[in-house]
Amino acid sequence: MNRKLRLPVSAGGVAAALALWQLIATGPMAGGPLPTVADTFAELAGLLAGGAFWAALADTLVIALAGLAAAAAAGVVTGVLIGSFEPVRYATAAVLEFLKPIPPIVILPLVVLIFGPTTPMSWFLVFFGCVLPIIMQTVAGVHDADPVTLDTARSYGLGRVEILARVTLPSAMPFIGTAMRVAAPAALIITVVAGLLGGGPGLGRSIYQAQASGDYPVLYAYVVVLGVLGLAFQGASALAERRLLHWHASYREVLTP
Amino acid sequence: MTRTLATHHHPGMENSMELQENPVALGTAAARPRLEVTALSKTYGSGPNAKCVIEDLTFTVTTGEVVCIVGPSGVGKTTLLKCLAGLQPATSGTAAIDGRRIDGPPPEMALVFQDYSRSLMPWLTVRKNVRLPLRHLRLPAQEMNQRIDDALRAVGLDGSDGKYPWQLSGGMQQRVAIARALAYRPEILIMDEPFASVDAQTRFELEDLCLKIRDDFGMTILVVTHDIDEAVYLSDRVVVLGAKPARVLDVIGIDLPAPRDQISTRSLPEFAEQRTTVLSMIRKPA
Ligand SMILES: Nc1ncnc2c1ncn2[C@@H]1O[C@H](COP(=O)(O)OP(=O)(O)OP(=O)(O)O)[C@@H](O)[C@H]1O
Ligand SMILES: [Mg+2]
C-alpha cells in the first residue's frame, strides 16, 4: 500500500470506530453504563489534569517494564543454558511444558496471599507471566543455530563462552525478538489485571475504584488510556525488534527497483 | 582488482620461511609431512543405518605444498575435510599435524567451508565477519585492522567492508569467507571448493592469490576442487578420490615449472599431459 495513504487510512479507521461507539452509546444503549465518546474524553481531560492519574500511570509503567526486563534477562540466560546443555534440557522440558499453559491469573490469589496488594505482588506476576515463553523461545532459538555457522566458529578456535555469546545468542535473537514482542503487551495486561483483581498499585487499581463507585465515564477514560499504552508498548517492542534484527531475513531492507 | 598481501610474520612460521629460498624443494617426497592422513575411515550413523563414506584413506601433505583433492560429487571430500579440521572424529585411523593426532580444531589451521553463505554470520558486517576469528588472537588493534584490510583488498572486496553478507552476491560472499581465512594467517589452509561461485577472471586471480600466500607465508594448502584444470594449475600433487566408500585412487605429482602463470603454464604441453592423466584417473571405472 502507498506509504502516503497509510496514515490517513488508519486515522479514518480510528474515526469510524469512535463514531460507532458514539452511535451505540446514544442509540441502543442510551442511558446505560456505556458513556458517550464526548463524556469519556471530557473525563479523560480531567484525569490528565490531576496528579493521581500520573502517579498510577507511573506505577503501571514501572511494574510492567521492570517485570519485563527481569523476565527478559532471566529468560535469555536460562534459555541459553538450557538450550546448550542436553541433560539440562531434558531435566527441565517436562516442568516447563507443564508451567507454560498456566495463565498468571491462576496463581494470583496465591501471590496476593504471600505479598499482599503490593508492587512486588504485581511485579512477580508479570515476571511469572513473561519469563516462561522467553525461556522456551530462547531454547528453540539456540537449537535453530546453523550447524555450519557453529562449525565455522569452532574451526577458528573460538572458546565455548565466546561461541555462546557471539554465535549462539545472535542466532537465537529472532526467536527472542518474537517472544519479547508478545511479552511486552502481556506485561502491561498482567500489571493491569494484578491491580484490577489483586489490588496492586497502578491503573488497574484505578479502574477497579472507578467501577466500584459506578463512575463509568472515568472507567472508560482509563480504558482509553490503556488502549493507547498498549499501542505504545507494541510499537516500541516492534521498533526495538526491527533495530536489533535488521540483519534478519524478515527485516532486510529490500530496495525496490 | 589489486592483489597485495603484506608479509607480516606469523609466529611459528620462521622455519617455513626458509623453504621459500628453495621453492623447488617444496612438495618433494624428501620433505617431512605436515599433515598426515593414515588409514582414515568415516562411517556416519550406526547399526543398520550405518553409512561408510570413507574407508582406509592415506595421504600426506608437506609443509609449503599445495595439494588438490578431486573426486566425484558425494564421494566424501567434505567429510574428509571435517575430520581433518577436527570438527568430527574419524571412525578409525588418524589425521595428524606434525605427528600430533587431530582430535579438535587445530589452532594453526583454517577451513573455508563449501557452504560459504551459511558459514558467514548474517548479523555481522563483512569486516566484522573477517575480524571474528582474530579477536581471540589478541593482536594489537593496528595489526588486526591491517590484516583485515590486506585480506579484503587481496580478494577485491575493500569497498564492501561495511556491507552485510546477504547484501553481496554468492561469489562475493565466497571471497569474504576466503578473506576471513587469509586474515587469520593459518599455517595450514584447507578450502572446500573455494572458487565455485566466482567468475572465470576472478577465479584465475584467486588461484594466483592462493599460490602467492603459499610463497609469502610458507602456508600449507589443501584444496578440494571439481575443476581438473584448476587442480593441475595449483597443485604440487593431486589426490584423486573415488569409489564408494572413498579411497585414494591415485596421487599424481604435478611437475610444472614455478612460478606458475595463468597463460604460459596452461599452454605448456606438460599441462595438457598432466590434465589428461588426472582426467583419465577420474573417469576410469572403479
Ligand atoms: N552428517 C551426515 N550424516 C550422514 N551422511 C552424511 C553426512 N554428511 C555427509 N553424508 C553422506 O556422505 C557422503 C559424502 O558427502 P560429502 O559431503 O562428504 O561429499 P562431497 O565429496 O563433499 O560432495 P560434493 O562434491 O557434492 O560436495 C554423501 O553420500 C552424504 O550423503
Ligand atoms: Mg563437499
Image (spheres, rainbow, N blue to C red):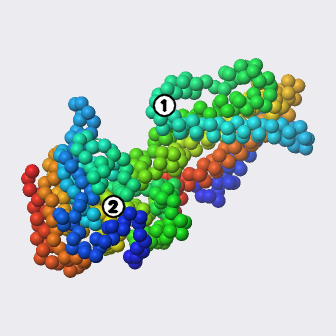
Horizontal and vertical percent position of residue A115? 77, 24
Q: Secondary structure at mark 1?
A: helix
User: At x 58% / y 24%, what residue is drawn?
Assistant: A99
Labels 2 and 1 share a subunit: no
Residue type (three-letter) at the residue carrying disc 2 = Leu
Horizontal and vertical percent position of residue B179? 41, 65
Who is closer to the viewer here, B238 or B225? B238
Horizontal and vertical percent position of residue A166? 52, 50
Residue type (three-letter) at the residue carrying disc 1 = Arg
Chain identifier of the residue bearing label 2 in the image: B
Q: Which residue is mark 1?
A: A89
| Residue B10 seen in the figure | yes
Q: Residue furthest left?
A: B285
Who is closer to the viewer here, B52 or A184? B52
Q: Which residue is mark 2?
A: B189
| Front disc: 2 or 1 | 2
Chain identifier of the residue bearing label 1 in the image: A
Who is closer to the viewer here, A31 or B76? B76
User: At x 66% / y 44%, what residue is drawn?
Assistant: A234
